Image (tube, rainbow, N blue to C red):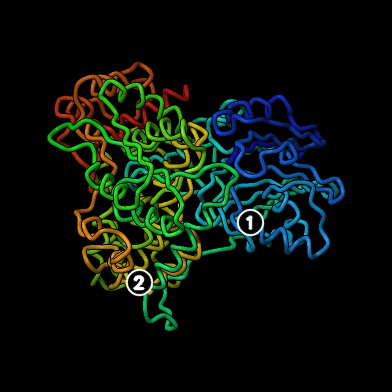
Amino acid sequence: MCGITGEIRFDDVPADVDAVTTMTAALRRRGPDGWGIHASGCTALGHRRLKIIDLSDRAVQPMVDPELGLTVVFNGLIYNYRQLRAQLRAAGYRFFSDSDSEVLLKAYHRWGTRCVDHFLGMFAFAVLERDSGRLVLGRDRLGIKPLYLTQTGNRLRFASTLPALLAAGGLDTSIDPVALHHYLSFHSVVPAPRTILAGVSKLPPATVRTVHPDGRQEDRQYWRPVFSRRSDITDWPAAVLAALRVAVERRMVADVPVGILLSGGIDSSLVVALLAEGGQQLRTFSVGFEAAGGESGDEFQYSDLVAAHFGTDHQKIMITSDRLLPAVDAAIEAMSEPMVSHDCVAFYLLAQEVSRSVTVVQSGQGADEVFAGYDWYPPLANVPREQAAAAYAAVFVDRPHSAMSDLLEPEWLAAGDFFTRDHSQAFIDSHFAAPGADTALDAALRLDTTIMLIDDPVKRVDNMTMAWALEARVPFLDHELVELAAACPPELKLASGGKGVLKAASRGVIPDTIIDRPKGYFPVPAIRHLSGSLLDRVRDAVTDPVAKDRGLFRPDWLHRMLASPNTERTTLGSNALWQVALLEMWLQERKI
């Protein structure tokens, strides 16, 4: 796990090594174990290293293979790198390290951009071809590893985080009106390639982009899950359990210890159970917060039960209220994009504590999107396919398009076609209209798995854990497991109140108490119920002169929200004032 940066110019001017060095320095927290820069004419690459595989200096990056004429910078992990290494050695390749980075480099030489089809893992990479001058960028199937880009007429830069691009300057930091619409409507998700800033984009997941020296670019989307039925599986719970067992075992590949984030829910408990089958001593970690607004802030009763049942070396981390406010600002600083979920603060503080003990953790993130665990899925069960997009929007979209005029200043409503076009509904409509996805639920899960999941929970885990140089692995996003889940009949996923097939697979594997408990979330009650010093922080942000000059939100709406900060909720129950304040705090933190 690392951070990568780079620049390629299209005007025969040497790459700006100082800018790449600045971007690389901005990624220090993602890779505290070393750094390097490689410059070659119009291209320069930068890398920050977190040692996970091959801890020796032979694995440093940027990694150059003069024999093959290739240089690579790579963030992530290829879980099957040992198998690919053996295959490539049999084909005549010689290796000078034991790293997965070198396997990627050799695999690219052998298979070109098709190398990604051979990878099991999470990754973002850049490969520079010495002889052609081409730069090839790639991102894993589920977008677990990020890659941000900014381009002017004669230059393209990329980095693992958006703030790293900002650090080098020279980009358009104006707000993208369409992205703003998505942020306020599509559950605060801004789908790729957009970001909230007009001058920054992100490489879409499952995409390989070839950048030519003259500026021409070609994208290839190499994967998309198919949401239609399979006739070769008769025992779905057994098939799901077998695939998950493979997924968690793959994610134990490391030359450093691996822990598990244990919430006490079915997903993380199942990860613990399957790893415990090997008889190894497991290290597990749980986090809790003080109660607020009558809402409990921890689920220790369940995580304690699982830890005791499987005999793990368990650490409970209780976060007191005095740590919350500083952590809010620190978590915002760690965000590549504004992320509303209060889970961000939880993951940030959990990662801070866990990083003192281990460098790698597995997490149960992603199971709800893959196996239909959220409460907006059951209403779609019997909706006709042609009505699916509207039905999905009714249960998912934060606020109707008509409500935007109550929230935003008139000049933003006039920006582009903001007011006359419901951008989020149009985005949903286009995805639901794509071929495949047999039922309304299939279409919703396809959208959530390939869009929402990537730019909300997955990004949240990456940003908050990497802020503490902690590598998080997500077995429920093993692409083979995701493909299996996509083909599973919807009624099996919706059974038992959601995630029915996963619950059935868990019987006899984890305690029934965990399977049958009410669905839990990563609770941070003080953000859901704003008061005290945190409410003061919100008030300061939205009334700051910078916010007033920006002129995004109507003063009368803000005044009403500040007077009653916990009454207005989005469709999915988020605090509406927090959603607005988080965006403003992020912009101010980035000095935009």
The three-letter amino acid code for the residue at tag 1 is Asp
Is the residue 123 above or below the residue 346 in the image? below
36 is higher (above) or lower (below) than 483: above
Query: On the rendered structure, is 576 left or right of 206?
Result: left
Residue at image location 69% in from the left, 60% down from the top: 84
Residue occupying the point 80% across, 32% down: 13
Q: Is residue 182 visible?
A: no
Front residue of 55/448: it is 55
Above or below, comparing residue 188 to residue 205 in the picture: above
The residue at 73%/28% (across/down) is 16
Neighbours of disc 1 within 10 Å: few (<14), some (14-19), many (20+)? some
Most extreme residue toward the top is 545
Which residue is more in the foreground, 129 or 271?
A: 271
> Can residue 255 be seen here?
yes
The residue that appears at 27% across and 32% down in the rendered structure is 578
**Callout 1: helix, strand or loop?**
strand
Q: Position of residue 310 (x, y in %)?
A: 34, 52
Q: Which residue is mark 1?
A: 219
Q: Provide the residue designation for mark 2.
A: 237
Amino acid type at circle 2 is Pro
Q: Quadrant of residue 291?
A: top left
Say which of 31 and 183 sits in front: 31
Give residue 213's position: percent from left, percent from top: 77, 45
Q: In which image quadrant can residue 266 be found?
A: bottom left
